[in-house]
Amino acid sequence: MTTQATEEAHEAGTYAILDTAREQVLERGEGLNESQLKEILELPDEAIPAALQLAHEVRLKHCGEDVEVEGIISIKTGGCPEDCHFCSQSGLFDSPVRGVWLDIPELVKAAKETAATGATEFCIVAAVRGPDIKLMNQIKFAIDRIREEVDINIACSLGMLTQRQVDQLAEWGVHRYNHNLETARSFFPEVVTTHSYEERLETCAMVKAAGMELCCGALIGMGESVAQRAELAAQLAALEPHEVPLNFLNPRPGTPLENQGIMDGKDALRAIAAFRLAMPRTVLRYAGGRELTLGDLGTREGLLGGINAVIVGNYLTTLGRPANADLNLLVELNMPIKEFQKSL
């Protein structure tokens, strides 16, 4: 298309990449490739509503109308030996977060409170490179106690795993395992140096092979380029996770990224549309940082722009929106909460 024709199309409110996405993603169910995703991420501000509308249509057609609600809690906070530059739980940074273990009765109580919101998923998280024998034993005990009192799917996020640990978690009935890529392969060395991208991929591959659902997320707004954002979306799509939590950097005091700044809300909305158009059938979950990056209005726009899952309540070291605020918004938008289904 010539420059003049492109300008005329933009004035008319039409964009070739959106027409392509409508036919490729909405009609055929094929996600956009990396170069196409970059075009979505570079759309002008006036095209954002059209991109979000298309992403919403894709979500409804390929995922259905239900929204999955999840709560998360940390069994072990702080003191992690890894140097993920965005994370206040690293023991290598001068962060206000200190190492704390949560006891089992508190975990059970949190699971009950999570189930009471209508959530179908409860995720147990530990700030570790990978679990040792002590932590694995605690996880097994926690799973057993929660199951005695709460009817909810249990997920875990415990860092990098061995094959034996993967097999144990699957045997114990862990429904879903979270292990994020966080950022594009080309940008990863800028934010993590104590382990490699390949190590993360190895854990993801073992989790999928064991039959657990893979939750593998993104953290955007860390200084990566638009091209690297597109790269990440394409790399996640290639991994085919069941769920992708979409996080936006909330710069934490004492970390190397504390002065990075908050991602622009319009860029965040472009990313939501792009990630949905990359992965039409994946659970795309609102996760950390949306409160600062998007606020109430942006949260609504994202739910109408491809998001079909929400973490309610607080995150691991930061405050989220009150659970009732998200649940009331889902009711207002006539979005049914996914009903619990036991899957072992």
Image (spheres, grey):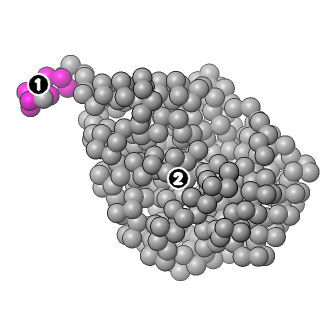
Name the residue tied to disc 2. 217
- The segment highlighted magenta reads 2-11
What label sits on residue 106 in the rendered view? none
Residue drawn at x 68%, y 51% is 212
Q: Is residue 306 above or below residue 133?
A: above
Residue bearing the label numbered 1 = 5
Q: CA distance from mark 2 to mark 1?
A: 38 Å
User: Quick check: marks 2 and 1 in contact, CB under 8 Å?
Assistant: no
Nearest to N terminus: mark 2 or mark 1:
1
Give the percent coordinates (x, y) of residue 1. Answer: 12, 29
Where is residue 330? Give x, y as percent: 62, 29
Name the amino acid, label 2: Gly
Classify 285 as above or below 78: above
Task: Answer above or below: position of 230 versus 297.
Answer: below
For image coordinates 62% across by 21% down, the residue present is 334
Residue occupying image coordinates x 63% and y 33%: 67
